[in-house]
Amino acid sequence: MKKAFKVIAVLMILTMAMGLFAGCTSKPAEQAATAEPEKKVEQVFVNIGTGGTAGTYFPLGGAFAEIWNGNIEGVNATAQSTGASVANINLLKDKKVEVVIVQNDVAWYTENGSEMFKDAKYADIRGLITMYAEPLQIITTDPSIKSVADLKGKNVAVGAIGSGVEANARQIIAAAGMDFEKDINAKFLSFAEASAGLKDKQVDVAFLTAGIPTAAIQDLGAQREVHVVPVDGAVADKLLADYKFFTKFTIPANTYNGQTEDVETLTVKAMLAVNADLSEDLAYQLVKTLYDNQDRVVAAHNVGKNITKETALEGMSVTLHPGAEKYFKEEGLLK
């Protein structure tokens, strides 16, 4: 009888212990069962249209991708090599990229349906920021050519057919009161071809639109003295009045061999553009994180030091995206 009692007592103790254990664990189990599942962050792909791998756009695009990947949750950004401005606009229109680096004049042609986009207007392009100067450079080895007016009757390299350089050359010639078809002998040449033409005197003058110093001009300067024709005075005033994408620029003395004085000209600017349907929040984050990590941009390329929020609206040639507008208003840079 005592033995049976002891067995019953042990069983009761075990039962109570199991009850206590169950009581201790039931609440967390219930909480685990009722807790909301962790929300997954939606992944957003941001493909960046840049330029050739040897140029400036590509390393900058790589830096932008790295910054956005590391600082915007859910973003998967990738820089891809392209044919630069005009090709990037077409990629943007076709929704094959989300962000493009373009010249601000080409962006303006896109939104307004002019020049190479005369029959392909795209009003849904939006601006994020402008970045750094790509000045108009009129180059010669002839010291007697001192003004745009002196180009009359000369063999002039005006860029490839349909290029942004050709458009700039036409604008400058017209602003000087000359006829592009009649007053100059236009040669449709690339930068490298124009440089070669200047070396062997098959070309008197060449138009280039590019960041300084430009490698093709430096190459020319290794063999001949370079003279830079100014775009100033009444010619510059007319261009500034007619086109919102131009701003004033000074090419410092000694940028090129033989160029011993500062030269006044105008410049377009490299900029970032997106589609109108990009979300306002994402556009805001793209702009904000770039300026929050400017040291990484500077490390990617020397021009990075010129990519500042204080100058980001200079030469903005297209409608500003609402997300970018929100950022610049927060920073007191836009009313």
Image (cartoon, rainbow, N blue to C red):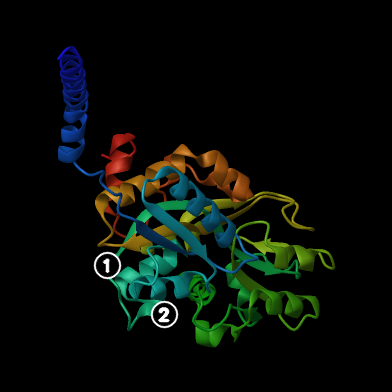
Q: How far apart are marks 2 and 1 (CA)?
A: 17 Å
* Farthest residue, direction right: 223
Whether residue 305 is visible? no
Which residue is depicted at the point 37% across and 70% down? 92
Amino acid type at mark 2: Met
Residue under label 1: 124
- For mark 1, does the 10 Å Cα neighbourhood hold few (<14), some (14 to 19), or many (20 or more) residues? some
The vertical placement of 113 against 187, above or below, is above
- Of the numbered discs 2 and 1, the one sitting upstream in the chain is 2
Q: Position of residue 333 (x, y in %)?
A: 34, 38
* Farthest residue, direction top: 2
Does residue 38 appear to the left or right of 150 in the view shown? left
Does residue 160 appear to the left or right of 5 in the view shown? right
Quarter of the rendering containing residue 118: bottom left
- For mark 2, does the 10 Å Cα neighbourhood hold few (<14), some (14 to 19), or many (20 or more) residues? some
Residue under label 2: 116
Q: Position of residue 206 (x, y in %)?
A: 65, 73
Q: Where is residue 31 in the image (x, y as percent from the top left)?
A: 17, 33
Quarter of the rendering containing residue 104: bottom left
Q: In terms of secondary structure, where does tag 1 sit?
A: loop
Which residue is depicted at the point 55% across and 46% down? 297
How many numbered marks, from 0 up? 2
User: In front: 228, or 285?
Assistant: 285
In what quadrant of the picture does the N terminus appear?
Answer: top left
Q: In terms of secondary structure, where does tag 2 sit?
A: helix
